[in-house]
Image (tube, grey):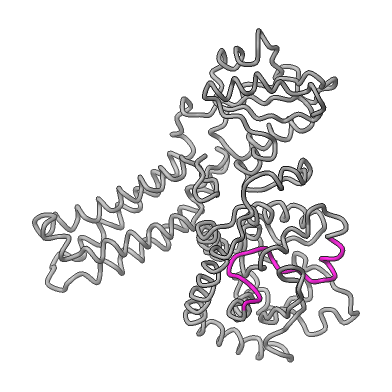
Amino acid sequence: MIRIFNHYVHRASLRSMFFDLTLALLVAIGAIAFQVGGIDHAMPMAGTHVVSFAAGLFVINSASGLYEVAPLGSFSRACAKALLVLLVALPLAYAIFGLLPAEMVSRGAIQFTVMAGVSALVMRRVYVSHWGTARTARTRILIFGAGAAAVVVGKTLKASDPNAHIVGYVAGPNELETAVPADELLSLTGSLTETVERLNVDEIVVALTERRAGSMPLRQLLDCKLAGIKVYDLNSHFEKTLGQIRIDYLSASWLIFGDGFNQGAWRTAVKRVFDILSALVLIVLSAPIMVITAILIKLESPGPVLYRQERTGQLGKSFNVTKFRSMRTDAEKDGKPRWATTNDSRVTRVGNVIRRLRIDELPQLFNVLKGEMSMVGPRPERPFFVEQLTQEIPFYAVRHSVKPGVTGWAQVRYHYGSTVEDSQEKLQYDLYYVKNHTLFLDLVVLLETVGVVLTGKGAR
């Protein structure tokens, strides 16, 4: 993993994305140069087209999720993502290179050459992701601990990172009971440092259930770190691997003394300028969609096109969020707040479509302009649920230290929450965002939101 502006990104994902992007550009430049007689003539004539294609392809690649490090078993999912990339990238290539100068008689050949090149690259990416991974490049990880926490770490690594290889578990000195299978436990031959060197370990994750005095060999762990081996504690492991901060193993001291939570005046000003500019652009681009949506809502059922509902914002202040009405007007006729559920009978036919495509969220852009919301942040929740969740979930109030968002890290990483357990899972992603939020992470979330909208992931 590599940390870019506080956000962890897989090195393999970055290498793959930029490698494929470079190849696609070479195909485009080569096709044009072949037709016009050299690169010297190609770039002045088609440089703008190539740059536009590169920018568009980068956005498509980033939003598609095709370059995410995924378990090897998800071949069908990778094919679906590849199809989505091709459905957007091929028409884009055809349109951009169709705008080449009219005197370029071989414009059609250039279009189809670039389209064929992009198709080949995407198919290659599917193959490499699932059958071409070099086993020698896998990270060898030793888990120091053998209790329940160590089991959770092991399951997390196996489920989320195919490049991770767990060499085994080492029980802590004070761990009397183990939850790890006996055949995966390692017995120390010599010191921990000698064992790590013998097994060619790259990383150590300290996952001790018992952490009282004497349970952690600090000197040996320090020696491992001085020898170039990465050592992570439990919370840092989940932050790095899953992009979340697990609250079941979280202490307030880790939040207080760790890095992050940079919310100074400069960051606030940059985020506000970004919010205003992006909201204005999206309002202009989505204006036709919003007009059509308003007409369809009015035609299907009586009642207002928009609805306003009280939500809890930054520092616990209440505001009224604005959304397109997607439910019947008597959705809560008994006056009791309820979470939306799968196949909710209160949702109208138009409402079902606009919720799946996230169109119902578009009026919140005006909340962004008013300064009540941000483009990216934790989802604003109703005060009734906030009071309940604050009492039941530790650290829930931390998410209110920033403005709520139209989209957010939790929204693109986890499905729609309709229970206290779902809210706890989403909080773990919200805590990661609050701790590490930067303009870079906001851009990552917006790009992933495009993929979520196109696939309808997590809609209710």
Give the left or right position of residue 395, taking residue 353 as reference: right
Give the left or right position of residue 267, taking residue 381 as reference: left
Picture mark count:
0
Q: Residue at x 66, y 48 (%)?
A: 244
Vertical comparison of 293 with 428: above or below: below
Location of residue 151 (image quadrant): top right
Instruction: Name the foreground residue: 158 vs 409.
Output: 409
As for residue 385 lying within the magenta part, the answer is: yes
Location of residue 403 (image quadrant): bottom right
Q: Where is residue 99 in the image (x, y as percent from the top left)?
A: 24, 72
Vertical comparison of 447 with 301: above or below: above
Residue with the most extreme top position: 190
Give the left or right position of residue 37, taking residue 98 as reference: left
Q: Position of residue 27 (x, y in %)?
A: 25, 52
Instruction: Name the foreground residue: 376 vs 295.
Output: 376
Vertical comparison of 442 with 195: above or below: below
Residue with the most extreme right position: 334
Q: Position of residue 159 (x, y in %)?
A: 64, 38
Question: Which image quadrant: the C terminus?
Answer: bottom right
Give the left or right position of residue 411, taking residue 289 as reference: right
Q: Which residue is drawn at 71% across and 90% down?
A: 304
Residue with the most extreme left position: 37
Instruction: Name the foreground residue: 348 vs 134.
Output: 134
Q: Give the range drawn in magenta.
A: 371-389
Q: Residue at x 55, y 23 (%)?
A: 226
Instruction: Name the foreground residue: 165 vs 265.
Output: 265
As for residue 14 lying within the magenta part, the answer is: no
